[in-house]
Image (tube, rainbow, N blue to C red):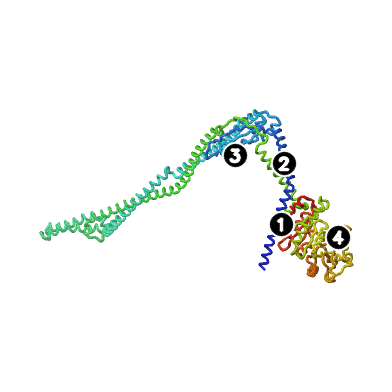
Amino acid sequence: MNSLDNELSSQAETRQMQKLKMYQKLVVFTVLKFKWSIIAVFLLTIIAGAAFRYYQFTHSFHKYEGSVTLFYTPRASEEVKPLSINHVLGVFSRQQIFHQLVEEMHLTEKQKCVLKQCIEVKLLKDQNDMFIITGVGDSEEYVKQLVNTFVTLGIRNYKEYRTAELQNFLDTRNQRLQELQDSQKALIESLHALHRKYGIIHPKEEKENVKKIQGEQNAALAELNVKLADARHRFSIAEKRYKELPPSVIKHRGKLQEFIRDLRDASRAYEKAKLMFAERNPRFVEAKTAYEVTAKEFEAFKAKNNITEFDENMLLGIEGVINRYLEAEVILNQLELSMKSLQAEIALVKEKEAKLQHMIPELESVEQLKHTTDKNINLLLEELTRVRSNIAHVPNDIIINERITGIKAFPMFPVKILAILFIAAVFVSGIYTTIVVTYDLKHGKFSGIEEAAFHKDFFDIVGIIPHEKASFTMEQRKIINNEMFYRFILGLKDTRTLFSCSLDGSFLSSVLFDEQFTKAKRNTILIRLILESEVETICANMQKIGDFYYSDNGNTGVNYTEKDVQHQIEYLHGFSSGDGKGYGYGYGFAFFPVRNLSVLEPDEISSLYNVMRELKKHYQLIRISREKPFDATCLLMRQLHDICDATLLYIGKKQTPRAVLRRVLQLHDEEHKIYAVLTGVTDVEKIISGDYI
């Protein structure tokens, strides 16, 4: 199945290629056929273009040309970039310049109308900083004046445009500078407000001092904590010893010490008197009395001062204990005061540090804004300086590099115009050729031997039937007929079934070979397809064999109603077999009735196959035709072409539409041959010389 599909696809591709080649050859033939008219159209187009150019040149201002080259050297800056060269060209092409040009040169109305076409501003080739201004006119003086005036006006307009642009930019920058300066003043006032708010002039230096003071305070605090701990320890010990003494003893320690001394002196005197004197001795009594008085006074003093617990040992080192206590207390009090003073200083420093912590971010923010503003102001001042420099340089942006040195005259037919004329002629002749070829392919008719030569790949054999009015002698016609039949008799020797297709509108074309076949003793029969409704008229006296009606040339049955047709076949002669067997020998007719002469139905195709199989037993060549000429749109043509071994086409000069011929030639393939007979041919010399193949 796949091999069959591939074979069918390859056959379809082959037919498409053959069809394409046929069209290509036919197009070439048609072009050659109309070559003289195409050449005439080509020449007429050139002549018409040349006449139009002559008229245009004589009524045109484009007769002389002058140019000025300008060099564009602007001063570049980042703020206001220079105009691009295309922008400069746009400035030079402004409508305002042309209005000024009209006013200064006092041009006429005609000159005003063509003024824009007379001036051209363009970039110089391969140059990005040079452009050329070209002017054309009908006289040298006019061209010089036109170009020079235009250059002057263009440079002046550029200066005005560029200066205005830079000045506008400068004004906007000045406005921006004023805004920045106002912002700078506001920021300075903000700085002053911060200093007044926090009472700090130099916060960053103060912050450093605070850090330094805090370090010193931390060290002093650590040292004071150590001293205070030691003082508290010493004070606790001294206080303990101090508190072991009764307060009254401490308070009256001096008096007690005096009493103790007095008691000791009285005691020693009394002891001494006891040793030295008797009890009644005045001195003993005196010593005893003194001792007792002192003791009573001491006891009275203790009672008076509420001294209950007293030991004279308490008086030993009491001053030292009191002094050490007082000294430790003084030292402790001094250290505690120092601690309070240090803590107060630390609190003040912390408070200042807190102020600095709030102030510095605000200060830095304001200072950053001020720094940015100062920087922008400086940059803006530099920018303004550069812009002012650019404004001063504007008159030097465009320099006239080359004045008009000479005027060039335009030729009437330059190379460009000649090329345009040639291209236009080619284009017009191409359109004419396309129209002619397309029309001839669709609506043209077969034109004779020359066209047949382009279709020779589709024709296996080509024959000629000259027109009856052609200037041939009887001898020449006989030679042509014999040669034509010689070609066909050789080509048909392996052909059993032949489909005769008349495309020239003539019924006679399909029977003109009968005499030749009869003379050649070729056993042949012609099957004619007729309508079933015509059977009684045409085949009334004929013998019916199976599905067809038979008649040979010796019997009645060839009933042609047209007189000219009947006259043409009177010379045909048939031969009888003599033994009564078979259908005849020589030339015979078989009429096959069908329902429609445009398409065969399936049962009719089967019957026709049976008829052809039956006739092949008795005849060497079976020809199939119908009375009416074929239309290429009929499906019957395709059916008969597929049924038969070959197809014989009768193609009439200027009688067969080319579209019909192409559709028939598309049936050509390797299995079915196509023979052609050219009818109505009048090319005498080519026929005689044999160039028709």
N-term-proximal mark, 1 vs 2: 2
- Name the spot of residue 505 as percent of width and height, x first: 82, 56
From the image, tell me which residue sits under label 1: 457
Q: Is residue 345 left or right of residue 497?
A: left
Q: Secondary structure at mark 1?
A: loop
Give the amino acid at mark 3. Asn
Which quadrant does the N terminus fall into?
Answer: bottom right
- Separation of marks 1 and 2 at Cα, in angstroms: 36 Å
Q: Nearer the viewer, residue 120 or 574?
A: 574
| Circles 4, 3 touching at the beta carbon (< 8 Å) | no
From the image, tell me which residue sits under label 3: 86
Task: Decide: few, some or many residues near mark 3? Use Cα within 10 Å; few <14, some 14-19, many ≥20.
Answer: few
Q: Secondary structure at mark 2?
A: helix
Q: Is residue 194 left or right of residue 342?
A: right
The dot on residue 43 is 2
N-term-proximal mark, 3 vs 1: 3
Q: Can you see residue 533?
A: no
Task: Decide: few, some or many residues near mark 2? Use Cα within 10 Å; few <14, some 14-19, many ≥20.
Answer: some
- Name the spot of residue 188 as percent of width and height, x first: 48, 40
Give the amino acid at mark 2. Leu
Give the amino acid at mark 4. Tyr
Give the amino acid at mark 1. Asp
The dot on residue 571 is 4
Disc number lying in front (3 or 2): 2
Q: Nearer the viewer, residue 581 or 252?
A: 581
N-term-proximal mark, 4 vs 3: 3
N-term-proximal mark, 3 vs 2: 2
- Separation of marks 2 and 4 at Cα, in angstroms: 57 Å
Q: Secondary structure at mark 4?
A: loop
Q: Secondary structure at mark 3?
A: helix
Q: Nearer the viewer, residue 310 or 367?
A: 367
